[in-house]
Amino acid sequence: MASLHKTRSVEDGQPIEADVLVVGGGPSAAWAALSAAEAGAKVVLADKGYHGTSGATAPSNTGTWCVPPGEGRAASVEQRWKRTAGLADKRWMLRCADRAYENLLKLAEWGYPFPSEDDGALYIANLRGPDYMRFMRRRVQQAGVQILDHHPILELLGDDRRVGGAAGLSRRSGANFRVAAGAVVLATGGCAFFERILGGTGLTGDGYLLAAEAGAALSGMEFTGKYTLAPHGSSLNKGLPFRWATFYRENGEPLRDARGEPVTNGIGGGERSIAEALLSGPVYARLDLAEPAMQDWLRRGQPNCFLPYDRLGIDPFRDLFRVDLKYEGTVRGTGGIRLTSSECATGVSGLYAAGDAASRENVTGGISGGGAINASWAIASGWWAGQGAAAHARRYRDHDSSWLRPLGATGLRGTGRDAGIDLGAAAKAVHAEIAPLGKSYWRSAAGLEASSARLDALWKRLNNALPATGAERLRAREVAAVTASARWTVTAALARTESRGVHRRRDYPQEQDAQAARIIVSGLDRVTATREQPVLDAAQEGY
């Protein structure tokens, strides 16, 4: 059995060659690496954290969209599609369900310890994050993949037409390294926009920036208005227990909706009332709708959800406690790198995307995929991207790497016209433009235009600052990636003059049939938005 020891740092300037380079360390990265290795590719996986613990899945439990073969599969797709705000693609949904189910069976075959149901059958619809990712790391090692822990990729390498590798640094030693590869898979996760959420510290939209610098576009970035309830002051954005909650104002009076009814179910119909109330003052909750059997199930099924309460000496089923809505950006929102093929290609030769780094519009449309759909998407898209990258590498692998040039800019190669920039202050500034309820839960043209102007000014300052050096380059690139992601989000939100899914406009509160199109954003110094009509209705008949 392969060991789980930490990988050693590379030597400064060390060149590495691979058929496929996977950038990232979460489940989609693991599945991409396994898929490419199974296809015969020599694979390197570079994670800016420790592969197996980094990302949003490792500290959590997650369900999956687990649909067995049979007649029920089409019905499940149809039922899900009705909740996607009309922008998902049923064909992608079906193949996602198929691929995820097949790979869940692979997990069982490989020995992942799924629990058993009362009849003895394995229950494969839930994954325990720490166990799952530890298991996946072991499988990736057994497949012969070279893992580079704590080796963030800072920029892609290529030319105007294609990508052929990447360059990064070792966080332990500060050494620089570069990987020449036949193809690159970006599986870097979503963007939490510096919000404190579970597993979100390193989710800074790195892959979006890398892809855009290579010429790729993004899609669905306006569908980033996803928030989840959490105990006040906590980073624990696990909303399931709030399904059984009742909500109260600071004076102890029950919070009531527009019909005068007490607000309940904070992950369902009650969410908007809670968000409105939070704009004017604190909101409190109590999980008083959970019967004793449900209380026991919640504590056993989601033990990490109750740690903050236990530490504070709160019994959430009996006591009132204050709550926040935590911004989740594209971690549970939809937007990401636009996909242009069934193999998760990005439209840039040699570049693929998977998991939260890729747009999930094909399977979730304009709403959040929550845990289950997103987990299945990570499994399926990672597998497809790994296969696609391996096939590309077989066709086009060029062992002469002299043509590779660095594609990174902001944070690495500023003009230096201005002095250095306070990256901590810049991070707070971009967070303040995107995370508050009044800016992303409800949007308006005036608010978006004001944010756009401030974010554009910050982007110029980042470009004009002295280039970062040494290990500071990582922080500079993270701030650049989050700022760029915020600009794409605001641009897309301005272009969508309606409310649809998790994009809510106070000035355009209704969904407009004429706007059932996707919004594609691209560009760095100049961001543009275009509309792309999805292949819906007639084209999806008989999927």
Image (spheres, rainbow, N blue to C red):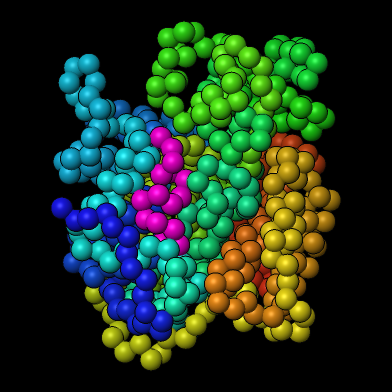
- Residue 28 in the image, given as x and y percentages of width and height: 37, 52
Residue 72 or residue 468, whichever sits in front? 468
Tag count: 0
Q: Is residue 366 above or below residue 19?
A: above
In the depicted structure, whether residue 321 falls above or below residue 474 = above
Residue 371, located in which quarter of the rendered image? top left
Image height check: is 517 above or below 13?
Answer: above
Considering only vertical position in the picture, is 399 above or below 188?
below
Q: Nearer the viewer, residue 456 or 74?
A: 456
Q: Quadrant of residue 150?
A: bottom left
Apparent side of residue 477 relative to residue 373 in the rendered image (left or right) = right
Left or right of residue 135, residue 248 in this image:
right
* Residue 296 seen in the figure: yes
Residue at horizontal 32 percent and vertical 60 percent from the top: 6
Q: Is residue 390 magenta?
A: no
Is 55 inside the magenta-drawn segment? yes
Q: Position of residue 404 (x, y in %)?
A: 42, 86
Q: Where's residue 49, x and y in %?
A: 44, 58
Relative to 44, 347 lies left or right: right
Residue pushed farthest bottom?
A: 402
User: Where's residue 542, x and y in %?
Assistant: 34, 41
Q: Residue at 53% of width from left, 54% of height from top?
A: 203
- Residue visible at 32% across and 64% down in the picture: 7
Task: Give the residues in magenta.
Answer: 47-61
Which quarter of the rendering shows the C terminus? Answer: top left
Residue situated in front as seen by the camera: 504 or 328: 328
Q: Main secondary structure of the magenta part?
A: loop
Viewer can see residue 346? no
Which corner quadrant of the image does residue 278 belong to?
top right
Look at 73% across and 71% down and name the residue there. Answer: 421
